[in-house]
Amino acid sequence: MHELSLTQSLVEIATEHARRAGATAIRSITIEVGDLSGALPEALDFAFEVCRTGTLAAAATLNIRRVAGRGHCRECAADAEAAQLTAVCPACGALAFELVAGLELRVLELEID
Amino acid sequence: MCISCGCDASRPESHHHHDGEYDSDPHTLRVETELLAKNDRLAAGNRGLFGNAGVFVLNLVSSPGSGKTTLLERTLAEIGTRLRFAVLEGDQQTSRDADRIAASGVPVRQINTGAGCHLDAHMVGHAVEAFALELLDVLMIENVGNLVCPAGFDLGEDHKVVLLTVTEGEDKPLKYPQMFRAATLMLINKTDLLPYVDFDLERCRTFARQINPGIEILEISCRSGMGLEGWYAWLQAGVRQKRAGDQGATGCV
């Protein structure tokens, strides 16, 4: 549900940057969404259809780059995939697994006219 | 209208001055901006305001019905004369919770989020304008009952405190990890019901630490009063620390 406010933010960020660059329209917005960020790409897509209306992004497409979860263990120094949000190291089991990727929620770039 | 947050968000997009120099090739604009940047900026503003006033701020989060308002009522009744409290109540609609708190005589404001599933830093920043923050020790912000969405929205609090009840199942921390990762303290509430439910306290603690090894855990019953002394001690320690200028954890995810 919070994807709606995230999407409002993304349209706000994009239109603000586009306006400052003197753009007349935004063709596309590329965002980065971590698999463990708690935001659903499908829900962002859905909310975008609504939020872009009446803005410089009215005809824009939304490109979502997903980022897989990855972590590093402070105990055994393993670098491993993190399919879930957890502090348990998948290699040694220590409670020392720190996420290094997968929490991203970021506007990367715009294509503007 | 609002200088600090620029909340005249409805202003129309202006189609201005570049019509004559239209360039048919699109070009790429690097943005590199966090989606939550605006909320984080407003939350930092709130945190500065709370820090200057020396008020200890907690963001109470949980599923609906886990006893956040009852915890507040009991806390205000039992230590409301020792510490100066104010309360912000977040709900989609009604002022029922604020009315309950108002009965204690403590300053309270209700925030209705309408369709919104969480409080954000903008709402909180405006709602606290009603309080004389420098006259407070503790500001309690009761978030919308929701274990998912409020996790990502920093309000400027010192800590998130998550409530979990023994009727919900001990695996909630694994199923809703964002919230338990963001919280400093987990209160396991309604422990007076333990004899009637299959809830394994030890497993619950283990699950919570698998998500957040540093999380503090207290068991309480707002009905029987069991364990509340520990909660009050935790609160008072936080107030002392805040007054000493040591802000502790930021509450950021």
Image (cartoon, rainbow, N blue to C red):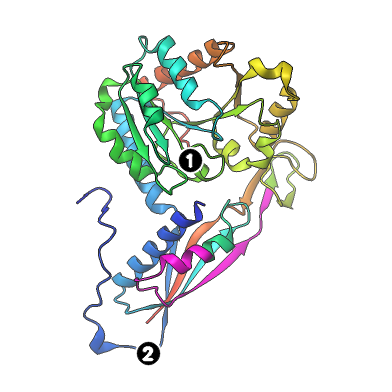
At label 1, counting other C-alpha atoms closer than 10 Å, the crowd grade (few under 14, some 14-19, many 20 or more) is some
- Specify whether B112 is left or right of B147: left
Give the image location of residue A32, x and y in percent: 54, 63
Considering every residue shown, the one lying at the far left of the view is B1
Residue found at x 73% / y 38%: A75
**Does residue B207 appear in the picture of this structure?**
yes
Up-down: is A82 above or below B192? below
Taking the image as drawn, is residue A108 in sight?
A: no
Compared to residue A84, the image places residue A20 above or below, namely below
Left or right of B205 on screen, residue A39 = left
Secondary element type, mark 2: loop
Residue at the far right: name it.
A92
Q: Which residue is mark 1?
A: B252
Q: Amino acid at mark 2?
A: Ser
Q: Position of residue A82 (x, y in %)?
A: 70, 51
Residue appearing at x 29%, y 76% in the figure: A22
Identify whether A80 is placed above or below B168.
below
Q: Which residue is nearer to you in this view: B161 or B56?
A: B161
User: What residue sits 36% from the left and 48% below the top?
Assistant: B41
Task: Give the residue at x 59% y 11%.
Answer: B226
Query: Circle 2 is placed at which residue position?
Result: B24
Identify the element where label 1 is drawn. loop
Considering only order in the chain, which callout, 2 or 1, is on the residue closer to the N terminus? 2
Q: Nearer the viewer, residue B180 or A76?
A: B180
Q: Is residue B190 left or right of residue B99?
A: right
Q: Is-magenta flag for residue B7?
A: no
Residue at mark 2: chain:
B
Part of the protein shown in magenta:
A46-71
Picture quarter with the C terminus of chain A: bottom left
- Residue B102 in the image: state x and y as whole percent: 33, 22
